[in-house]
Amino acid sequence: LPFLFIALTILTACSPRTGPAAVPNSLSGHLLFTQRESLWTWALPNGEQQEIVPAPKIGQQITSARWSPDGTQVTYALFDSSDPRNAVSQVFLASPNGQDVRVILPAAQPLDFYQSPAWSPDGKSIYAMHSGGSGQQRINRIVQMSVATGDIETIADDIGFFDVSGDGRWLAMARSAAGGLSLDLLDLHTREWHTLLATGQFDNISAPRFDPTSTNLLFGGTVGARTASTSAESPLALGTTVAEAHGLPQDLYVIPIAGGQPKQVAALQADDPALSWSPDGQSVVVLWIDSISVILASGGQPTRILTPGSYGSVDWSR
């Protein structure tokens, strides 16, 4: 079973630089994004880009991050392969300027990986992917951790790119099975699974993100690439090797969580796009190696607001 972790590439560090197009004055809020190995913020439209968490040393990389619902904290995952045989990924909390850092999901042993943290809507807990162990003792699960107590609960004995809805009702996940990938919803009240996209409808599915109303789901997807090599159909499992290949090129789609047909938002052919909605739900921001770009949620051409881009994550808060 392939593990749907974010594939990692250790890239030459360099600072962001503004792209060729001016940032539209209609954009507002704050971006939190990975750039090379570190973590940055950007007050839109004309604020400065600030590196708030630099990668501490060679072999370490911040792979994903999210604003807290009230914007007073950030959580991020730090992958450490400085000793490749004992690589780990841990989750941290920090203030918006990168201070007051503390680890909240520490690796218990080598090859223990906590990844892709996401906040609960009330800001009291954090969800994350957790993989570790070996053989029959292998752990692959989604956990929920109380920020106040540190208590950890297993939410699903499965793993994949995921998001939690703003109303606290749903967890969306790209799930792997023998026939490929599906896009499913877990009802966090009843713990029942519901399928949005059945296995085989898309050759690749990644980066699901709920809109602010918790009624629509944005995701990256690939259709019609069955002839591509099997090794490219899912991102690389953490703890094996560092790779340049990230997967099949993806376009952006949106689907109602009540069910229905997905609608293409943009034909990007992007490598491992990371996605987020604008706070008002009218636009989406996309981070990939080409750029950070903004696209109307109703569809249209992307507007580059920062080049080059990177791999990792992007989050858009008020």
Image (cartoon, rainbow, N blue to C red):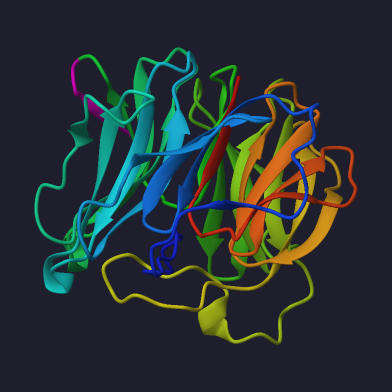
268, above or below 70, in the image: below
Q: What residue is rendered at 86% in x and 47% in y?
A: 261
User: From which residue to which does the magenta span run?
Assistant: 149-154
Foreground residue among 19 and 197: 19
For the N terminus, give its image quadrant.
bottom left
Q: Position of residue 61 (x, y in %)?
A: 32, 56
Q: What residue is rendered at 16% in x and 41% in y?
A: 106
Numbered label tally: 0
Q: What residue is rendered at 9% in x and 54% in y?
A: 109
Q: What residue is rendered at 45% in x and 12% in y?
A: 122
Q: Position of residue 127 (x, y in %)?
A: 38, 33
**Figure quadrant of residue 204:** bottom right
Q: Is residue 151 covered in magenta?
A: yes
For the C terminus, give its image quadrant.
top right
Q: Is residue 90 left or right of residue 221?
A: left
Foreground residue among 207 and 174: 207
Q: Is residue 49 covered in magenta?
A: no
Q: Residue furthest left?
A: 109
Q: Is residue 50 left or right of residue 146?
A: right
Residue 76 visible in this rendered orientation of the protein: yes
Foreground residue among 144 and 31: 31
Residue 130 visible in this rendered orientation of the protein: no
Q: Position of residue 41 (x, y in %)?
A: 48, 35
Q: Position of residue 59 (x, y in %)?
A: 23, 65
